[in-house]
Image: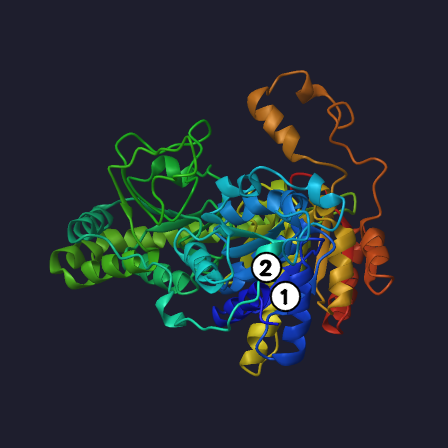
Amino acid sequence: MYTTSFAFFEALWAAGVTHCFVNLGSDHPSIIEAMVKGAREKKDRFPRIITCPNEMVAMSMADGYARLTNKPQCVIVHVDVGTQGLGAAVHNASSGRAPILLFAGLSPFTQEGEMRGSRTEYIHWIQDVPDQKQIVAQYCRYSAELKTGLNVKQMVNRALQFAQSAPQGPVYLCGAREVMEMDIEPYEIRQEMWKPVELGGLPKSAVEDIAEALAGAKEPLLITGYVGRNHAAAPALVDLANTVKGLRVLDTGGSDMCFPADHPAWLGLRFGNEAAIRTADVIIVLDCDVPWIPTQCKPREDAKIFHVDVDPLKQVMPVFYIQAQARYRADAITTIQQVLEQLKSNEALRAKLENEESDKRWKAMEASYTERLQTIASKAQPLEDGGFGTGHLCAKLKELCPQDTIWAIEAVTNTAFVHDNLQPTIPGSWINCGGGGLGWSGGGTLGIKLASEYEAKLKGEKGKFVVQIVGDGTFLFSVPGSVYWISRRYNIPVLTIVLNNKGWNAPRKSLELVHPHGLGSQSTNEEINISFDPVPDYSGIAKAAAGGGLYAAKVDKAVDLENALARAIEAVQGGQTAVLDCKVALGC
């Protein structure tokens, strides 16, 4: 048989989708038949199927894969309930601009055997809902129902065009059993005709205005959040920072490694609150969702602000605006290149950039950078009671892990300490969720490792060492029972570091920002219901899920930390996932 389902998988493979993360159900008989047929007849030209016992983990794996490679992967779930099971992962992919194709079946629309695929089970009535697409449509760049097999390849490629066109994100297709069972004639489409939309650069006047402003600035600042998804962005920003002496670069998104920490212009990662925002006279906001939080920090009144983004209006955010004198929809890399060319080719601008004042700014920036690193190091020392904080832990991780390690981060309130001490410098080496749906990093880390190994194998190389750093509450959100079973089943070895501070501390921070002197500010974690006491055995949970085939350990003393990390790293390098439960102090 050559069915809609088989043509669906052919379309995925032809479009570059190499993996399908699946959670199957009663809507998938023809999908299963197609999987078996593909495995037997097209072994090297058919997507690899990864069974995921939880939908959020499945989508988070596809998300992690896409974050590293910019290549969309497929997630297949079960009717409305599986679509709902995707949960916060849909939000994460939408906010974090991760291209993913979601597919779910629909309950059969015939019930008396009129067509192959008609209703055969009790649940087919229960799972028949008015409009299944609407469960996730507001988070998706595109959603549609497959109504015939005759154009299934066109529909798959139309969806992928949306997923891969900026701003990238998830797309959703669904199809009833009868449609997916439909016998059709084999056919091909011209794949080269289905490329995503490409963005251009800035208009000439904008290039001139931005270049003029930067050249004349005394405290220029560039704020970004997503440009690092394109691994060519960091070198381009370094060139810009070297050209505009004194330009500093701040990351307020933390989704990608946007600017290397070994450059003196590096201000690190801060979520919308940084002193440089208050003092800058020229600010470029480049591919960033939240450059600053006005109730905490905002630019000075006379600052010149230029906003360049793939989506400057933030069309899915009901409330968003910044006081920019100009805003443009443009590609970030093209924008940087245009501005650089203008700065380097215009003699008047070069004169402003190459003088005694610019040299003074560069030296002042170098001194400030040195002081910043010294402050970070001083705060990352072991504690007097023998314990340690997240900063010290991450400094040790940086020291012991391979230099090209990929860091998958979901540290929530500890994120700044993690970033300050890991100090990533390699494009693609830092990947954060980008959204607010906690639990991304479990599946996300596996997807990143899977992608690293697959892409490296194509080049005859070996994949990178991958480390997940996750808060204790977030670890529980990640569905570890599913994550570590998948890790063992498919031999995807990663190192998980659990930051165990006995609870959810983000809600306390949120509380105190609104009610700094309220009742809650004087209450214990137990009283405000954010405590994890008794403390779960996090590494034990993971080991049980892996059927015992996992390295599990705990550490709570600084004197034991280096040896504990070394043993965990050795286990992962030997092919076994390791989970290290680290008791960390708050606020450092």
x 12%, y 60%: residue: 347
The image's mark for residue 457 is none
Left or right: where 494 falls relative to 338: right
Question: SS class of the residue under badge 1?
Answer: helix
Where disc 2 sits, the SS reads helix
Q: Position of residue 398 (x, y in %)?
A: 62, 61
| Residue at 64% in and 16% down | 518
Rendered image quadrant of residue 504: top right
Query: Which amino acid type is shown beneath numbered disc 2?
Result: Met
Q: Is residue 229 left or right of residue 454?
A: left
Q: Position of residue 538 (x, y in %)?
A: 80, 49
Amino acid type at mark 1 = Lys
Return the mark for residue 180.
2
The alpha-carbon separation of the residues under discs 2 and 1 comes to: 32 Å
Which quadrant would the N terminus be assigned to in this image?
bottom right
| Residue under label 1 | 449
**Mark 1 crowdedness (10 Å alpha carbons): few <14, some 14-19, many ≥20:** many
Residue 212 in picture, x, y percent from top left: 18, 49
Identify whether 176 is placed above or below 321: below
Circle 2 or circle 1, nearest the eye = 2
- Residue nearest the observer in this picture, 124 or 221: 124
Q: Earlier in the sequence, mark 2 or mark 1?
A: 2
Residue in the foreground of this view, choosing between 273 and 321: 321
Tell me: residue 572, above or below residue 542. below
**Residue 188 seen in the current view:** yes
